[in-house]
Amino acid sequence: MTILYELDLLGTLVFTISGTLSAANKKLDLFGAYFTGFITAIGGGTLRDVILGNFPVGWISDINYLIVISTGVALTFLFKRYIMTLKRTLFLFDTIGIGVFTIIGIEKSLSMGIHPFLSIIMGLFSAVMGGVIRDTLCNDIPLIFRKEIYATACLVGGVLFITLNFLGVEPSLNQFITIACIIIIRIICIRFKVSLPVLKY
């Protein structure tokens, strides 16, 4: 759990930076940028916990999340130009983040007796809903509704996690395999421009 917790904080940092960058591109003030970074980082997990009735929600019971979010906002404001040059690194960390958030959402749901299929949905919510709220606040079409493979990678990873869990694979190994699967899917899809069909009329 220590490694997963550390990766969770890393994912929170990257999601915060993502939200803050979106706010900066829309020329929001410091409060608007902080709020957007904050909601991007904790939105998915908060929605998941509210749906599951899991109170208090995760970030309220652990001050480290607020510290990481505040750090992410500050770093983005101070080093925005440099951070913008790290797109590949941020992409990798973002992908690790959605993989970790997917696993955490699934494991929390399973621990509360939720059906495995619904647990996958909760894992998806954990991973992508913060980004959906971010894009909505910034008046953009949410990333999961565009052509890029994002939510689909989380769903595939979630199915794999549940399958390996059913087969009795050791939890840490299962987590590693699932995160690696999500990373590989996203990298392959970006590299070869693979996307879902677009609905046309």
Image (cartoon, rainbow, N blue to C red):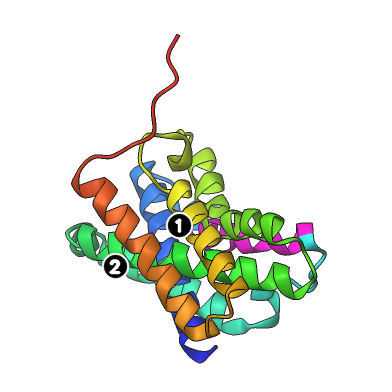
Which disc, if any, is residue 38? none
Which disc, if any, is residue 30? 1
Query: Which residue is painted at 42% across and 77% down in the image?
Result: 176
Q: Nearer the viewer, residue 134 or 159?
A: 159
Specify start and end residues of the magenta stretch as a single range.
33-51
Query: Which residue is painted at 57% across and 55% down in the image?
Result: 124
Location of residue 35 (image quadrant): bottom right
x and y, in percent, of residue 115 in the image: 75, 61
Q: Is any atom of residue 36 visible in this view?
A: no
Quadrant of the frame with the N terminus: bottom right
Q: Is any atom of residue 92 visible in this view?
A: yes
Location of residue 104 (image quadrant): bottom right
Question: Are there few (<14), some (14-19), or many (20+) residues within 10 Å of tag 1?
Answer: some
Relative to 72, does residue 81 appear above or below in the rendering? above
Q: Which residue is mark 2?
A: 78
Query: Which residue is painted at 70% across and 55% down in the image?
Result: 118
Q: Nearer the viewer, residue 30 or 138?
A: 138
Q: Amino acid at mark 1?
A: Leu
Query: In the picture provided, is 192 more to the left or to the right than 129?
Result: left
Relative to 49, does residue 130 appear above or below in the rendering? above
Relative to 155, does residue 63 appear above or below in the rendering? below
x and y, in percent, of residue 160 in the image: 50, 63
Q: Nearer the viewer, residue 85 or 155?
A: 155
Q: Is residue 48 magenta?
A: yes
- Secondary structure at badge 1 equals helix
Tell whether label 1 touches label 2 (CB within 8 Å).
no
x and y, in percent, of residue 95 in the image: 37, 62
**Labels 2 and 1: the sequence-earlier one:** 1
- Whole-angstrom CA distance, mark 2 to mark 1, is 12 Å
x and y, in percent, of residue 33 in the image: 46, 55
Q: Amino acid at mark 2?
A: Leu
Q: Nearer the viewer, residue 180 or 32?
A: 180
